[in-house]
Amino acid sequence: MLRRDDFGADFTWGVASAAFQVEGAWDADGKRPSVWDDAGRNGRIRGGRVGDTAIDTYHRLDEDLDLIAALGVDANRFSVSWPRVFGDGRGPWNAAGGDYYDRLIDGCLERGLEPWLTVHHWDLPSALQREGGWTRRGIVEDFATFAAAVAERYGDRVRNWMVFNEPLSVVGHIAAGIHTRPGPHPMQALASLHHVNLACAEAGRRMRDVLGPEARIGTTNVFTLAAPFDATGSLRRAQRRFEAFLVDSFLDPAAGLGYPFEDSVFLKPMRRYVRDGDLESAAFDYDFMGLQYYGPLPIRRVPLVGGLPVPTLRSAEANVRSSVGIPVEPDGLLELLRRYSTHPACRRIVITESGFGMNDRLVDGRVRDDLRVWYARTHLEAVRTAVAEGLPVDGFFQWSYADNIEWVLGREARFGLVYVDYDDDYRRIPKDSYRWFQRLLTEPTGVD
Ligand code: BGC
């Protein structure tokens, strides 16, 4: 049995989403285009311009907030669209666009939901991308100015903040050339990695000035580890190189430790972008670290590249994988919580995303998503063990409350607890997993 009580009274339960993935209304009320609006136009998203409407939450806010509240969660995590509130990237503040987040925040509070605000979840204004986006060092100042404006505007009602969603993913998009031309672009990615780290820390400081000591300012990162977990020798050393690059190159600078150049050869060419004083500037004392885990990264020796160990999602390691190709490994979550709870950037850990992508089907008005329930149960069991061990983890946010636009995959991978029927006016239909979460969160006897 899994019971809400097992996690303690101070544990925060929530759902998470992001502006581009749900809002739609891509050009409403003065909103300017983002790089993801462009991606839809440029054929980089399956289905094309599906993000223009996304799941139309901009116009269905009350219905969505009602569904979230009825689930029994404490909190609703969402992001602010930079080009909706700050035009082409540098303001002025767009009052009509900003009103949407007033309605969202007030709607949460009226329903007893705590608003958890992510300042940025990937939808960079297109105009800034034309200037080089994250590869340009000046973006640090642009981002910090935007973050301070958001804090200024909503700080009277929002207590929990996340500066940035998964910098690693943005670095990956840049490496792949999603917003430019197909990659690889390793040097652009490394320049961006450093600039994002500087931007997050600078934004954190400006937000602290605006919000004062009471606000909880965190951020979120991809957390992953290399499988198989029992590797030894040179395979384990190769795994360590990937883990250092994927996770520590964001956590270490935040903690003032600089970059793990020794552990990860991939990072070495980045030294040319690091100037005197940057390692101090890249540090910020976050109140909590958002851990986002979907699965491990399997690494194996591949004969084609001379037996070198390389990541391969095609390996046979996992019995189950999500429809985005990620292998499922709940023990990985426990291992990550154990490993990183002593990292100085992780004073507290909140699981700000966990979820399972599938090609759900609506059959006779019902979505039987047993696999998603199994995924949630096994991962929550791992979290329960971590809590029992006294690790500093105090929240869990399910990705996502409803199906939405899964970036380049468009509508093709569904992660929601609520099904969105794109063929029937975006109708919302709670899946079996929604009912399961609702029982877990509202019934004292818990769930199987
Ligand atoms: C992102 C979400 C995304 C989810 C599922 C995370 O990396 O923050 O925006 O939808 O993974 O792939």
Image: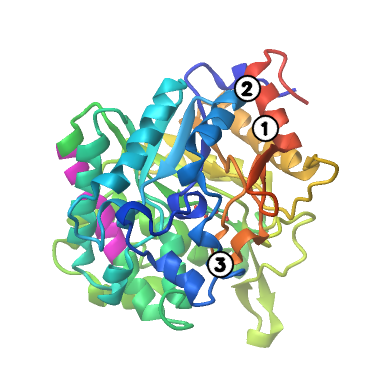
Indicate the secondary structure of the residue bearing disc 1. helix
Mark 2 and mark 1: span between their CA atoms?
15 Å
**Residue 270 lies in the magenta stretch:** no
* Mark closer to the chain start, 3 or 1: 1
Q: Does residue 9 sit above or below 332 in this rendering?
A: above
Quadrant of residue 148 within the rendered picture: top left
Which of the two discs, 2 and 3, sits closer to the camera? 3
- Residue at (60%, 16%) from the top-left corner? 5
Q: Which residues are magenta?
A: 195-209
Q: How many marks?
A: 3
- Which of marks 3 and 2 precedes in the sequence? 3
Q: Is mark 3 within 8 Å of ligand 1?
A: no
Q: Residues within 10 Å of mark 1 (few under 14, many from 20)?
A: some
Image quarter where the C terminus lies is top right
Q: Which residue is mark 1?
A: 381
Q: Assign the magenta stretch its main secondary structure.
A: helix
User: What distance separates the C-alpha of mark 2 from that of mark 3?
Assistant: 33 Å
Compared across the picture, whether 161 is left or right of 301 comes to: left
- Residue at point 14%, 38% (across, down): 209
Question: In the rendered image, which residue does mark 3 sit on?
Answer: 408
| Relative depth, front residue between 182 and 195 | 182
Q: Position of residue 123 (x, y in %)?
A: 39, 59
Say which amino acid is labelled 1. Glu
Helix, strand or loop status at disc 2: helix
Question: Is 36 on the left-hand or right-hand side of 91?
Answer: right
Q: Residue furthest right?
A: 364
User: Residue 163, image x and y in percent?
Assistant: 32, 47
Are the residues at dot 2 and dot 3 in contact (C-beta closer than 8 Å)?
Answer: no
Query: Residue at (67%, 32%) from the top-left corner?
Result: 381
Question: Residue beneath label 2, please?
Answer: 441
Asked which secondary structure carries label 3, the reply is helix
